[in-house]
Image: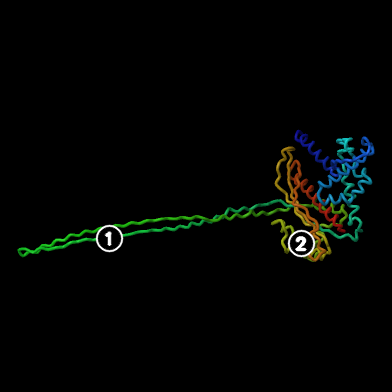
Amino acid sequence: MQIIRAFLPVLLSCLALTAVAQVQQARGKATVTYQGKAASAEDKAKANLAAQLKAVEFYYAEAGQSEAENFDVIRDKILASPDRYILESTVLAGEDSADKKQYTVAVRVSLNVANLRNAVKSNSAVAKTGRAEKSQLVFVFVSRQVDSTKSFDDRVAKRVDESVKVNSSNSTSQKGSEGEAIGRGQVKTNSATSFQTSAAADRSRTVETGGSTVKRSSDSTWRLIPSANLNQVFTSTFTRAGFKVSEAAFVEPYTGGNFKVSRVEDDYKSGSDLKATTLQSLVLGMRTAQVPYVALGTLDVGLADKDPNTGLMRVGVTVNAKILDLSQTIPDTIASVGPVQYAGMGPTEDEARTNALRLAANNAARELTSQVTNLGVR
């Protein structure tokens, strides 16, 4: 019971964060110049509205370049009806500089992100196109985790060069004398011999060592993680943006046997890129099925660890994704995301991984849709 009580506040906070995901906080600051002795109520209201608009712009700037472009599209809509997009506004500070005749105000606002995204969607080219005229988009996303890693010992080669030089000299000398004497019928002989030898040798030795060390990077293999929930995230995000979306498995039977989901999965099990043959068959198959746009991507799950602040399990996910335009003779990448990392937490590793994958998939899909929306893709 104590364990349940300990986790209950954390779980409730997670649920609260999920519930308010469509409401975001942002801050803004603006300065207006006035003509009178002091800022009037009208001047202050003008500065307050400008600060609120700056807060919205700050939110989009933090969201990324493509989202910032969306802000430029809907700026006039926000000015025309700020209450629709700004749920509440709190003045943090206000300063009237009479000498400069300027009034400065800082505000914190709560943004209705759902209405902001709907405003972007309603102004997009795809939203203004009838369903029958919309181009189809197929996505192939794989979530995976490292299954095994093979590391290699360093390969060391050594070489020793040695040279030896010897200098020697030798000398020999011999001396002798011989004589005889004759007397009384006898002959006497005598001889003397002297022998002397000397030798000398000098030796020098030089050694040089060298070699090389060869290192090899580790080879990793991946195991795929079931991603039915991810398919729902991608489908709903692209659909809400106004696109006609299909899962790759549903399109495979109409590709003339050229495209196989299993080939894509096998390639992603052994590396981060598709083989040339797999990519070419994918393009040919999608063209056979008359699909002009394909979204490809991987979500790489890291190892779980414990968050020191909450005590919950924490898992990171790295996303790489792109959208290909196959309507061109040479396929073109019209949108891309990553590598970018997101993290999720939960009481167990499985829940933390699920939360991280959901967060990564949602953000990646939203960024991709923002980019293609800015391009006017129908």
Q: Residue 9, how many percent across, how many down?
A: 79, 36
Give the quadrant of the N terminus: top right
At label 1, the amino acid type is Thr
- The residue lying toward the viewer, choosing from 37 and 359, is 37
Is residue 10 or residue 30 the one in the foreground?
30
Task: Identify the residue under disc 1.
Answer: 172
Find disc 2 in the rendering and name its residue: 260
In the rendered structure, the answer to whether residue 94 lies left or right of residue 264 reads right
Residue 297 in percent (x, y) is at 76, 55
Mark 1 falls on what kind of element?
strand
User: In the image, is residue 307 above or below residue 197?
Assistant: above
Name which quarter of the figure residue 296 lies in: bottom right
- Residue at the image point whose x is 92% and y is 46% from the top: 79
Residue 332 shows up from this direction: yes
Q: Amino acid at mark 2?
A: Lys
Within 10 Å of disc 1 (Cα), the crowding (few <14, some 14-19, many 20+) is few
The answer to whether residue 186 is above or below residue 342 is: below
| Residue at position x 39%, y 56% in the image | 203
Residue at the outermost left position: 184
